[in-house]
Image (cartoon, rainbow, N blue to C red):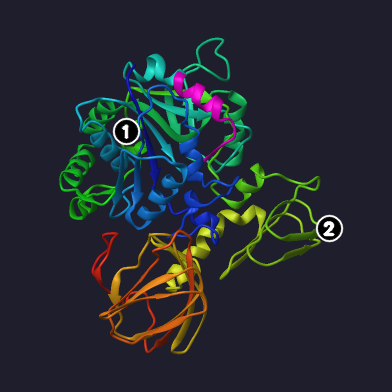
Amino acid sequence: MTSLVPVLLSGGSGTRLWPLSREMHPKQFQPLVGEKSLLQATVERLAGLPGMAAPIVVANEEHRFMVAEQLRQLGAEASAIVLEPVGRNTAPAIAVAALQAMAGGEDPLLLVLPSDHVIADPAGFRAAVQEARRGAAEEGSLVTFGVVPTGPETGYGYIKAFAPEGAPAEGGVRAVERFVEKPDLATAQGYVASGDYFWNSGMFLFRASRYLAELEAQAPAILAGARAALAGAKRDVDFLRLDREAFEACPSDSIDYAVMEKTRAAAVLPINVGWNDVGSWSALWEIADQDPDGNAHHGDVLALGCRNTLAWGGRRLVSLLGLEDVIVVDTDDALLVAARERVQEVKDIVARLKAEGRPQASIHRKVYRPWGSYDGIDSGERFQVKRIVVKPGAALSLQMHHHRAEHWIVVKGTARITCEDKVFMLSENQSTYIPLGSKHRLENPGKVPVELIEVQSGSYLGEDDIVRFEDAYGRDAS
């Protein structure tokens, strides 16, 4: 049996789920349904597929440590975590994965999956993969999985399949007649009524060499760019960094436009497995557990006289009174209140924030790092207070700052401190001072997380005021 290599695409930013999903911590790393993140759920639903190899993950280089940490939490290993220096859409990302999968001389089947979707029936999904695998994919078809529509959705693209006489609405790989863009409501209603159209899920199964051959025929510049980027790639700890110059020069295009809409080898397998791309807050409301009045709540939420609401609470109580068809999302530094029918426009808020240079567009108050996390508790003129958590065995870089001094107070665990030529231990309720311009490092030599409060003071407190001298995680010197 031909080996099966999952290719997990993890480069999205999920702006329609702002303020929970942000550029530096997008939705695939969030536990939106259940306790596991969407990325982790994607990995877990693959368990049990025959002949499955370790996945290839294609990710934004800014997310590399979140990918590695979330895989570690599952006890899963990737055959490669490929880092994109810039986004170039799905066609180049899949090309790089296909080339990487064939680097050892094999020609496996690639199961291409976005890492930010929800599938309610994992067993049904695995059965569909096996059905697509037998015959169609192994014999050279480029198979996509078309979701049997549950209604006239205008937010998805559609795939029209050739409909043999007497073919059932579900099951059986069929040739693709055409791909169509997101329709208006009347058109979508016609699509659903016909029984020949399916939602475009963005999931694919094909042999690696077959995709590359079609890409060379349909979009040779993309294949050339992917080859050059991989040829110039460099290993960095557990990651494979694509060559920046070559990948930036690669044309940006989706697999649909570059290959699937042009090839004669496109096939579709209709599936009904509870698929949802969680592309908006209204989509999350649809799949969330709801009370008899249609309210779906997460966190500490109190609602009186409400109908068809979604409230996502953070650290504090969220109260709703007499609301209907409203979305409320509360985070530490941003609050969203929106009419449910207009949540697709959340991306416009993110665009406005970016245009104004506001940090809420891209980062949360709590920021994850390979060594742990920090949470900005308070700030003002010439000062900033953070809560820092360092994982067991982890260490910050040996670094210095040009514009700020720091005071550290340990509140949990035991930390090892380096300040210039001094190395010493700090336990709970002990503190130290790091003068401006001093080389310093914070480490956790213990088996429990170290938590401390950091008070910064100085003329400039930005995160770019860091000069690194040594770093275990391969980050730049400054």
Question: What type is the residue that disc 2 sits on?
Answer: Gly
- In the image, 355 versus 111, the foreground residue is 111
Q: Is residue 122 magenta?
A: yes
- Residue 300, given in percent of the width and then of the height, sits at 71, 60
> What residue is pinned by disc 1?
259
Question: What type is the residue that disc 1 sits on?
Answer: Val
- Magenta region, main secondary structure: helix
- Residue 332, given in percent of the width and then of the height, sits at 58, 69
In the depicted structure, whether residue 22 falls above or below residue 55: below
How packed is label 1: few (under 14 Cα within 10 Å), some, or many (20 or more)? Answer: many
In the depicted structure, whether residue 215 falls above or below residue 319: above
Q: How many marks?
A: 2
* Residue 274 visible somewhere in the drawing: yes
In the depicted structure, whether residue 221 falls above or below residue 210: below
> What residue is pinned by disc 2?
305
- In the image, 39 versus 273, the foreground residue is 39
Which numbered disc, 1 or 2, marks the residue closer to the eye? 2
- Residue 182, given in percent of the width and then of the height, sits at 50, 41
Q: Residue at x 44, y 54 (%)?
A: 13
Q: Kindly check if marks 1 and 2 are in contact, taking CB atoms under 8 A apart as contact.
A: no
How packed is label 2: few (under 14 Cα within 10 Å), some, or many (20 or more)? Answer: few
Q: Secondary structure at mark 1?
A: helix
Q: Quadrant of the N terminus?
A: top left
Q: Which residues are magenta?
A: 117-130
